[in-house]
Image: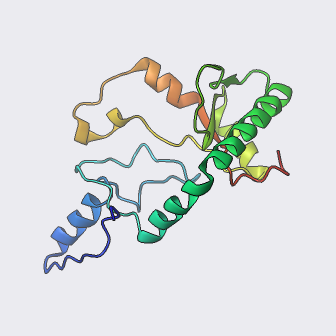
Amino acid sequence: PNTVDGGAIVFNNKSLLDKAILTRDFGINRKTFRDEYAEISPSCDISLSGYGATMSELNSYIGCMQMGTIQQLLETQRLNSERWDTFLTENYPKVYKLNTRREIQPNYWVYGCLAENKLDMMLQFRSLGYYASGVHLNNNCYSIFGDKKYLPGVDSFNRNFLAIPCGWWVDRCLL
């Protein structure tokens, strides 16, 4: 399997161990990666290149088992997206919805939108039981990619982008 499980590395040097722990997780220090709202912290720098070697065999098995019902799961996510369309239109008419291109069929694990006051809206959704999040920071924030470039469009997008859970696991009773 491609889960990178089943091996072991032993170190007699703490600094090498610490480096290996970072390297196996894209160089991310998980102790400082999230802020007090559990959002990705812009103060957590990634200064070491790494790779994703943290997936377990259990996660791989779950993914394989979903393949038998993948079309049903994707359809549920599309229906959840339609429900968010309606909910946002009725309750947040100023929010810009990012799924307006009908010629594509996204995999809606999250429903993306742009909100003027991202933090307030994120906390409102969380109070309703939906773990809304900014999901990512742009990569140019991390020193591993060189000097931080000012990218006004990217910065504006990240300042306003909010992802609302939309996957097949979302409780539709709350929608």
Q: Which image quarter holds the N terminus?
A: bottom left
**Quarter occupied by residue 160:** top right
Residue 83 in percent (x, y) is at 79, 36
**Residue depicted at 31% across the width and 53% down the height:** 26
**Quarter occupied by residue 65:** bottom right
**What's the coloring here?**
rainbow
**Residue depicted at 51% across the width and 52% down the height:** 35
Residue 152 in percent (x, y) is at 43, 18
Residue 39 seen in render? yes
7 or 38: nearer the eye?
7
Residue 119 to residue 98: above or below: below
**Horizontal side of residue 35 vs 95, given as left or right:** left
Residue 44 in percent (x, y) is at 38, 49
Residue 38 to residue 88: above or below: below
114 or 59: nearer the eye?
59
Q: How many marks?
A: 0
**Quarter occupied by residue 55:** bottom left
**Residue depicted at 60% across the width and 49% down the height:** 70
Residue 29 in percent (x, y) is at 35, 58
